[in-house]
Each structure stands twice: as structure tokens, then as C-alpha cells.
Amino acid sequence: MNPVLTLPFPAEFSAELNFQFLKRSPKEMMHRLEGDVVTKLLRVGEEQVLFRVSYDAERLFITFLNIRKPSALIKEQVALYVTEWFDLASDLKPFYDMAAKDRLLKDLVKTYYGYRIIGQPDLFESLVWAVLGQQINVAFAFTLKQRFVEQFGESVMWEDVPYYLFPEAKRVAALTDDDLMPLQFSRQKSRYIIGIADVFASGALAKEHFHGLPLEEAKERLMKIKGVGNWTANYALMKTFRYPNAFPLEDAGIHNAIKTLKKLDAKPSLDEVRKVFKKYKGWEAYATLYLWKSL
């Protein structure tokens, strides 16, 4: 099959590094990576659209698998999704100019030049994933996600391989603790996720509601949802909305990275982390990304 769409990417983009990020767990259910090609299922209106993304030195190529003649709407929505997914629209030149003069970041941005915030354009998925990861290690979080998606998500078979959609909010809102706890969800995690789904299913919350909001207002709106604290809200603001100044202050990875890079005897306090990040004002999310990458 020949590519139907091409998306040029900026000079400050490393396809190799960003595709590597997609390999972070063999239990990832929301895409399948084989070599330098990632395959993903996306809902566009009533259609389930399976597509592949590959790349060369200057652009991404999108090939549709299960739809021979995709409509203009499907092409538009898939191109928009991939642009958000791979963070193609962010201008990182100012961040790199700042980071090149910073003792902690200068070597990281040189080593990982072109690394970007690989996103989760779906806000419901982003919040559920963040809640799933609360107070457990990443490996077990992926196990919970795998069980959740296999049990409640729709799928399409292609060449004898299933590709999954993230469970819809309406379906999750109708679940009970008895549905989720056998998957090893804690009762609290179960109730948080069903509550988040209910907010989306009722129409009280949608990604569109955040358009144009300043960071603090957007964060306050997210934190009104039970189970969404400062870290979870900032995670969504980074991964879904691309706020470059989103800052998950309490994140253990940030603290460990600063401890290692500064050769401290103990992890820094919250005030010490704030002091470090004063230099990164306006670019906290990308500073966080590169500190995470250092681990």
C-alpha cells in the first residue's frame, strides 16, 4: 500500500528517538510497533480507522490499512491526531537555546536532540492512564491497562492481530467495582476511574472545554474531578494539551534525575526542585521530559 498522507516534521525532531519511546512496554495495547513502523486504531466518527505511520529523514508517512478510500474527514482527523501524538507543532528552538546554557540540561538536549513529548491526544485516556499509574510501578500500570483495554475496549483484527480502541467513557461509566477489582484494580482506583468516565459520559467534561484556557485555570478544572491531583492534572496538561509550562512538581522521576545529575546525597526537597525549575520558566514540561529521559 502506498502512503496516503505525508507530514513534514521540524528540524528539531528525531523520528528514531520518538519512535523508540513507543517501545517502552511490550504490554502497550494502544499501538503496535514493528521496526520503524507503528500501527494504530483510531475512531473517527462512527468509523474504526486502522493506519500505519513510518518515516524518512524529513517526514512521516501515513498509510490507511482497512479503508481503501478514506474520506477528507478521516484524512484530516488522522493527520491532526498524528500531529498531536508526535508533538509536531511545538517550536522547540527557544527551549533548546535556553537549555544549551543550563548545567543540568545542556548535555541532555545535545544527546537527545529532537526528543519530544509523545502525547495522548484523548483526554479521557490520558486521565485514566495517569490514575492507573498512581502509587504503583510502571510495569504493573501497563499490566492493568492491558487487562482494562482487552476487557472493555473494541478491537479490529488485521492480519490475525487485534488492534484496540481505548474503552469508551460511556461503557466505563456503567461498570462497577465488581467489574474492575478482579483485574487487580484497587477499590479506590476503580472508583476514581468510573467517576472520571461518568464526568465524560455525561458531557460535563470534554477536551474542547479547555481551548484557550490559561494553565492554572485548566489545572483547577481538572482537579475538581475526584482522583485527579496536581501530578495527574499536570500529566494531562503536558501529554494532551501541550502546555509547555505544565510542571508535575511531586514527580519522583524529576527528583531522582536532579539527585543523580547534581550528585546529591539525598533526593531534593520540593523547594529545591522549585529553585532548579525557576530557570526553566515557560518550559517546565520539556525540562521535565529531558530529566525523565536521563533516567
Image: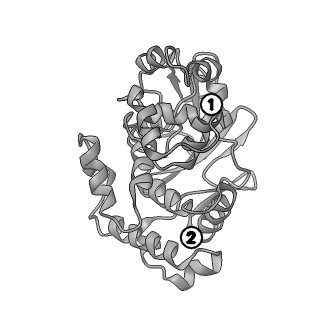
Camera-nearest residue between 124 and 6: 124
To which residue does mark 1 refer? 261
The residue lying at 76 percent from left, 55 percent from top is 160
Amino acid at pointer 1: Leu
Callouts 1 and 2 close, C-beta under 8 Å: no
Label 2 residue SS: helix
Q: Earlier in the sequence, mark 1 or mark 2?
A: 2
Q: Image height check: is 189 above or below 79?
A: below
> Can the viewer see residue 248?
no
Left/right of residue 46 with respect to residue 264 in the rendered view: left
Residue 255: x and y, percent?
55, 43
Amino acid at pointer 2: Phe
Q: Report the quarter where the C terminus lies.
A: top right
Assess disc 2: are there few (<14), some (14-19) or many (≥20) residues with their C-alpha within 10 Å of its C-alpha.
some
Q: Image height check: is 72 above or below 209?
A: above
Residue 249: name its quadrant. top left
Residue 113: x and y, percent?
59, 20
Assess disc 1: are there few (<14), some (14-19) or many (≥20) residues with their C-alpha within 10 Å of its C-alpha.
some
The residue lying at 64 percent from left, 75 percent from top is 184
Residue 171: x and y, percent?
46, 72
The residue lying at 25 percent from left, 51 percent from top is 209
To which residue does mark 2 refer? 152
The residue lying at 41 percent from left, 68 percent from top is 197
